[in-house]
Amino acid sequence: MILKKLVVGQLGTNSYIFGSSTTKEVVIIDPGGNPESIIKAVEEVGGKPIAVLLTHGHFDHTLAVAKIKRYFDIPLMFNKKECDSGIYSHKKADKWLNEGDSISIGEITLHVLETPGHSPGSLCFYTKDVKEYEGQNIDGIIFSGDLIFRRSIGRSDIGGGDSNVLFSSIKNKIMNNPDITDNFLIFAGHMGDTSVGEERQMNMFKNYFL
């Protein structure tokens, strides 16, 4: 597995380079700024980018989209509700992503979840094909965007957010998802990584989504 996190832009957004160490195919998730740093990191890991994926369309997750897309000549993929709502209408997707879609990255299959609440078209991406991270045995990983963070949750008071919808997304799409166990790591749009099990026990908002 290739997994590289870069903290980019004015708001310290986590941008991820993720993919296969076998084929070197990678996706670039949420290029929110510092395009030169993202390009350099892709080249350092020997990655062959196949797509830009957006968890959602807020500016701090999208500022480097145009430069990254143009440099690597790769498609942009996100949820159409982000465009229709005006959250991110600067660029149309080359492929609209919906619940149940999947993206093949070498031997890794990345599954798409629609998880509104932070914004109308927010997405999470998860895979069960990663079983180890930094010496730790795991059941998989989730890229959660600004849905859930380490010990916290995403804001719901900006850009089409809704707190009730957000809690429902966390509960139904992550905590009660039969494909996702407590031993999944969560790589969020800001701050450090965590796990589903940790957030089930320690998230300050857990009573709202369990």
Image (tube, rainbow, N blue to C red):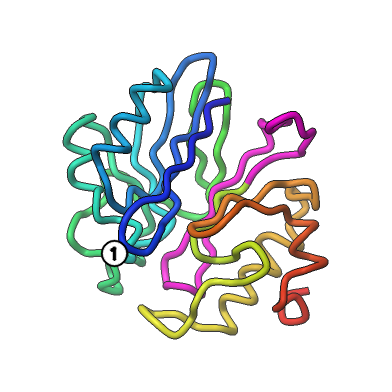
Q: Which residues are magenta?
A: 114-141
Q: Is residue 28 above or below residue 104?
A: below
Per the image, the residue denoted by label 1 is: 59
Q: Position of residue 197 (x, y in %)?
A: 80, 57
Please state if 27 lies on the left or on the right of 86 as rendered.
right
- Locate the C terminus and report the quarter of the image it occupies: bottom right
The residue shown at (43%, 29%) is: 26
Closest to the observer, 187 or 49: 187
Q: Classify mark 1: helix, strand or loop.
A: helix
Q: Position of residue 158 (x, y in %)?
A: 39, 81
Q: Position of residue 20 (x, y in %)?
A: 52, 23
Q: Position of residue 112 (x, y in %)?
A: 53, 49
Q: Quadrant of residue 85?
A: bottom left
The verdict on residue 125 being magenta is: yes
- Locate the N terminus and report the quarter of the image it occupies: top right
Closest to the observer, 131 or 43: 43
The verdict on residue 108 being magenta is: no
As shown in the figure, which amino acid type bears the numbered disc 1?
Phe
